[in-house]
Image: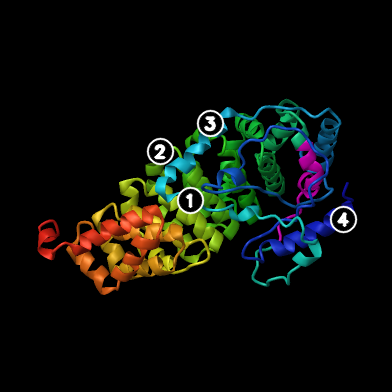
Amino acid sequence: MVSLEDSHSHNSVSNSAHFGQTRPYYYTPPPSSIKINRAMGRSMRTIRSTIFRTDCSGSEHSGAISENMTDSVIDIRLGELAKKPPVNSKGSSSDEDYLQLSQAFSDFSACSSDISGELQRLASVPVSDLVLTQNPNSKPEPEPEPCLGFLEREKFSTEIIESISPEDLQPTVKLCVDSLHSSSVAVKRSAAAKLRLLAKNRADNRALIGESGAIPGLIPLLRCTDPWTQEHAVTALLNLSLHEPNKVLITSSGAIKSLIYVLKTGTDTSKQNAACGLLSLALIDENKLSIGACGAIPPLVCLLINGTNRGKKDALTTLYKLCSVKLNKERAISAGAVKPLVGLVGEQGNGLAEKAMVVLSLLTGIDSGKEAIVEEGGIAALVEAIEDSSDKGREFAVLTLLQLCMDSVRNRGLLVREGGIPPLVALSQNGTAKAKHKAETLLGYLREPRQEASSSTP
């Protein structure tokens, strides 16, 4: 157990660092040696091995009592439940539906963002190493939270959560859900933080929380002026969205516009998780147009330009999913997505180039996309990618060039002038099977007399 004095000391450290860094981290004690049998749902960390991955933690603590959410009520309840024998439960079979994520990317399977920004854990890093000089321009400290112990003692509480059934946990979930409607920002922040943790890994918890009415209570917190509350709320909704029925509840409760608000106004972590939340909702095809129509694409482009590497990856993955719809392709081009995408093609070694080429390949599906890519110097960037990129990156580069040049003699001429033939010949001999085939096809187009193709070129 963590003493009250230790908890306060830990909280002071984590709060001083949290919003003074580009990407906040939460201290997580080393995992327990206790082995608990339980059924795991497909966590964000698992899902995003294809698109994005999750995990979450938080650190807050105080011994004060406020309204009906207190350390004593929650920890006593959880302590009682911890004494019960571990309960084995089966994960929801609906989580297997997320296997479609890998299929959705088809040839572009490398376009997979990694774990979202709030999820990187520092289990092996001492708390003392996380102390940073306070930034005078950082956001003010939030008011003390009345019920922080549940999250502060993460090792203790996680073991409890993983060993009890949804039926036993239901009173605690109800306590949190009821407290989302408190008049105290601190109580609402604490409730959102606890729901975020509860929804972190277990599919049965996500179902229980969704059925308990948490989603309509979390959505207004997305517009909260307190950044900690906003971050807990957006991350809780992101975790809950992994349960398929919760997607419908989230969209029907009007969350899309509020997630876009977070994408515009939140901290780096909140923006990243808002992008991932929109991505999760976009896995339902009918939501893609709604998300685009509500104005998600311009702030995603801003995240692509100004975000951290993690934020850029999340923006790329979400844009990829949204731009499978023609109208969203047009919106992305109008929002100025092509210029930063072309710029990212040249950034090798950070995992962004391949994803950027995949999105550019999608945008070649409409004429305005091809024109914008050529105008922004895309052909030269793609030729360099064939020379310098990974095997997968070369596949994406030659595919995009093939789409640009297939019906355009002008673009073929630009490709030749940019010195594209030597690297294409080398790729046709030494590339992967896919890259060889596409390079040979493109070289075939380049060998055609200009007049034969001119009739099909505007």
Marks 3 and 4 sit apart, C-alpha to C-alpha, by: 40 Å
**In this figure, which residue is indicated by the disc labeled 4?**
6
SS state under label 1: helix
Q: Earlier in the sequence, mark 3 or mark 2?
A: 3
Q: Quadrant of residue 14?
A: bottom right
**In this figure, which residue is indicated by the disc labeled 3?**
245
Q: Nearer the viewer, residue 67 or 2?
A: 2
Q: Which of marks 4 and 1 is nearer the N terminus?
A: 4
Q: Earlier in the sequence, mark 3 or mark 4?
A: 4
| In this rendering, the label closer to the viewer, 1 or 2 | 2
Q: Which of marks 3 and 1 is nearer the N terminus?
A: 3
| In this rendering, the label closer to the viewer, 3 or 1 | 3
Which part of the image, by quadrant, shows the C terminus? bottom left
Marks 4 and 2 sit apart, C-alpha to C-alpha, by: 48 Å
**In this figure, which residue is indicated by the disc labeled 1?**
260
Q: Does the magenta stretch include residue 152?
A: yes
Amino acid identity at mark 1: Ile
Q: Residue at x 67, y 40 (%)?
A: 195
